[in-house]
Image (cartoon, rainbow, N blue to C red):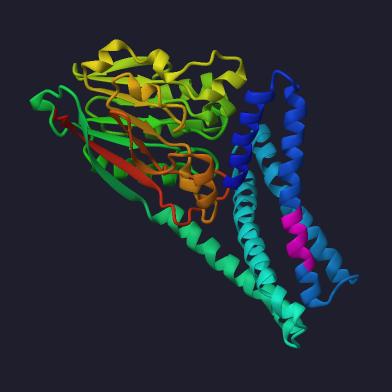
Amino acid sequence: MLIINYFIAMFAYMVQKTGAMLPKWILFTFFMILVLTIYGLAHYYVYRRLVTSLGIRGEQSDTILKYVFIFMMVSFPFSRLFVRTIGINPFTYTLDWLSSVWMGLIFYVFLAALIFQILLIIPTLLQLNFVPVLRKVSIWVAIGSGLAMTMAALYEARLMMKTTMLELPVKNLPPERDGFRIVQISDTHIGVLVSEPVMKRTIDAVNALDPDLVVITGDLVDEDAAHLNGLSDLLQTIRSRNGVYAITGNHEFYSGVEEAVAWAHKGNVRYIRNGKRTIADFLDIYGVDDPTAAQFGEPKVLPEDVIGVDARTRPSILLYHQPRGIEKAAETGIDIILSGHTHNGQIWPVSLISRMIYPHVNGLYKIGNAVLYVSRGVGTWGPPMRLDSAPEIVLVKLKNKSG
């Protein structure tokens, strides 16, 4: 689930801060033990509550339930292994979908069961006679609540695409370019679960906005490009008068950045990697690789090192996947910074945790003389769910900066 993505972010931070002192394999081992321990404990807690409620401990049905929980717990890592080794087919799709939905479901059931357990602390201390009945019933209420939240999150992720419309100022905008339309999409995570139907709906929504320019702010893909077959053909159906440009996110590097870039190129998507493209002879678009590049042996590049002096006099936009470490970039004269990555937490209440990790997690922010917009993104990572974080496409209309 997305909370594991935050563990990955924390792991990357640990590597950056302590990598000179500890071998990365030690940090990675610690990270994996932590994640698997938390995930395993959630399964064990729900399993024990079910066994107690059903009164089946030590019976054959207890053994069956135990193995069901063990199978579901390990199904997600195995589904990812199968996708990596044998590609996307009906078997790997079904296993990946079931295991991913299970991740979200067990999270919500565990959360609800834990809340009910806490609420019963005081009645238990008071030895009220209805506590044993409530404890048995509460796990079924937790399962019902988890199912309801899971269904709502599946629906929101699949069918509640939003369009956010912004008018953002840039300096020295030619009068004839007033209202220039830029569509931002982010975090599509094209792969097993975000495949052709989801892509087509997204592209139809983009085309309906009649863009002058389309920008993709990272995590276009979520799989090894060799497993995406002809999906790049769909990217060619994006209609943009001045092309489609993208930057790398962390998942491009996890998937194999060179292969991902080449795959997107077949779909007429051009990556800007630590450089600049001038659009329609007036707008400078700067693109900088995600910081994850440094973990894969590539040089660490800061946005302020890429942005040129022209940014102080010309309309300019920075595309940068993660919305942090951009304060110095905002001092270069850049007008607009477009980011993604956070998914706004993707599922509640992880969205509350995301606000503790990212100072800029969703929406519009003023940073110095620049404005930053952080998109919630289009796709999903982990569970194919969104709750209180609907997928979004962003339409930016440029206007001239006054003063």
Q: Quadrant of the C terminus?
A: top left
The residue depicted at 79 percent of the width and 65 percent of the height is 65
Q: Is residue 54 above or below residue 212?
A: below
Q: Residue at x 53, y 41 (%)?
A: 357
Between 216 and 288, the one lying in front of the other is 288
Left or right placement of residue 375 versus residue 262 in this view: left
Q: Position of residue 340 (x, y in %)?
A: 43, 36
Residue 269 in view, yes or no: no
Residue 116, percent across and down? 65, 71
| Magenta span of residues | 41-48
Please give left or right for residue 144 compared with residue 274 in the image: right
The answer to whether residue 94 is seen in the rendering is yes
Residue at the right extreme, as displayed: 58
Q: Residue 338: within the magenta? A: no
Determine if the magenta segment contains residue 44.
yes
Give the side of residue 64 with respect to residue 151, left or right.
Answer: right
